[in-house]
Image (cartoon, grey):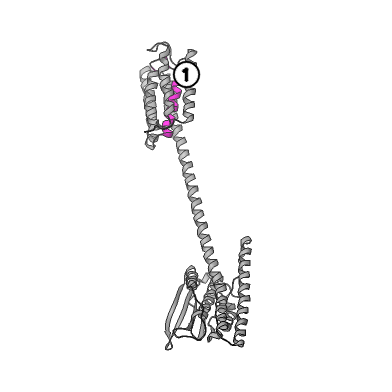
Amino acid sequence: MTLPRTHRDDVLIGAAGLACGLLLWSFGLYTQGPRARVPAGPVVLVPLLAMTSLAFVRRTMPRTALLAGTVAVVADQFTRGNLMTVVMFADIVYAAVVYGPPASARRIPVTTGLITIAVTLGFLAWFREPEALLIGVVTALITFFPAITGAVVRNHRQAADTARLRAEQTALLAEMDRRQAVIAERSRMARELHDLVAGHLSAIAIHSTAALSLDDPRTSRDALGVIRENSVDGLAEMRRLIGLLRDSAGHDEPAAAPTLDGLDALVRQAGMNGSASGLTFRLVDDRAPDTALPAPVELAAYRIVQESLTNTLKHADAGEVTVALQWADHALTVEVTSPYGAVRPGPRAPGSGAGLVGMRERIALLGGVFEAGPAEEGGGRIWRVRAELPVAEDDKEPSA
């Protein structure tokens, strides 16, 4: 078992107290007159040596030091007395409150206060002179006031530790928030990148497969034209996304986002890309002309239609694809239906399932409802994507 290491400051306090006490003794300076029960001499150094040695354990063994110091200061009263013995005892009381357990820190100030009152009343009853109050003052100076000072210092230290812990917790929460913000931003960027590029790449994959599999110069030329158009559009979209990311890094202004006004062009583009697969596209917009929606809702609806059209190019059977918008009961309903279940002519592009995940995430962020899956309609099977985007009355944009 290893003993706790003595602090350097405790060694300095003990050495300084011993040196000052020896200096007072060498000059013959005592705290009591010649009426002391023990005559002057080296015996006065015994309590001094005991008290200064207790300074070495004032921090590591505060309660033991206080008990032994009490015995030493009482023994000092039966000699001529050394001032440094009393001063060192006051430091022992202070250290017992500051470094001792919480229970001792609460009890010592109360105990020393009661001792001070008892000593004052006892000497007043004994001497019956007002000068007896001075003994009570001295008792308070070496017991009660050091204990109160230690309690104040301990409370300040505990408050500082609590503030430091709170600051560390705040910094940890801020770091967690920052990481969550980074993850959320990466997810948003992944959804935007997928929605921007997936449609163009799917069209390129379909038409390049058609050009390679069909030995028809005209068909190959048409496919290459579609491939070039989608390549140019995809590159433009990528450049626009990168530009928006760069601009948003140094500006607080919101970046421009696509709106539902661009659905006509989006559907026409899908019709061009899907013509080789026997797909036709139709847009049905049942919204009132003056319906104004919040930008996040319009962006989510646009991306849902965009991703749904991309999926039809990859997986839908030949037939008509319908894009329908409806506004009712403070909610925008987006529905995309496409033929499903038969074998269509022409090539198909592979899918990863990330599109459905992205659409669900978009709807969840807005508190809406999302459904995607096969259904029966008009005696045939279709694939339906349906999203309900709620819009609070206060969130609607003012109409122009």
Q: Is residue 107 above or below residue 395?
A: above
In this orientation, which residue lies closer to the viewer: 129 or 296? 296
Q: Is residue 63 left or right of residue 213?
A: left
Identity of the residue drawn at 50% across and 16% down: 23
Q: For this view, does 218 lie left or right of residue 98? A: right
Q: Is residue 117 above or below residue 227?
A: above
Q: Amino acid at mark 1?
A: Gly
Image spot of residue 138 (x, y percent): 44, 23
Residue at the (52%, 65%) spot, across then down: 187
Which residue sits furthest front? Answer: 215
- Residue 132 visible from this viewpoint: no
Q: Name which quarter of the figure residue 253 lies in.
A: bottom right
Tell me if mark 1 has few (under 14), some (14-19) or many (20+) residues whose alpha carbon lies within 10 angstroms of its own.
many
* Residue denoted by label 1: 21
Residue occupying the point 59% across, 83% down: 223
Q: Nearer the viewer, residue 141 or 76?
A: 76
Q: Is residue 249 left or right of residue 82?
A: right
What secondary structure is the magenta-colored segment mainly?
A: helix
Indicate yes or no whether the magenta region holds residue 236.
Answer: no
Task: Specify the segment rendered in magenta.
Answer: 77-99
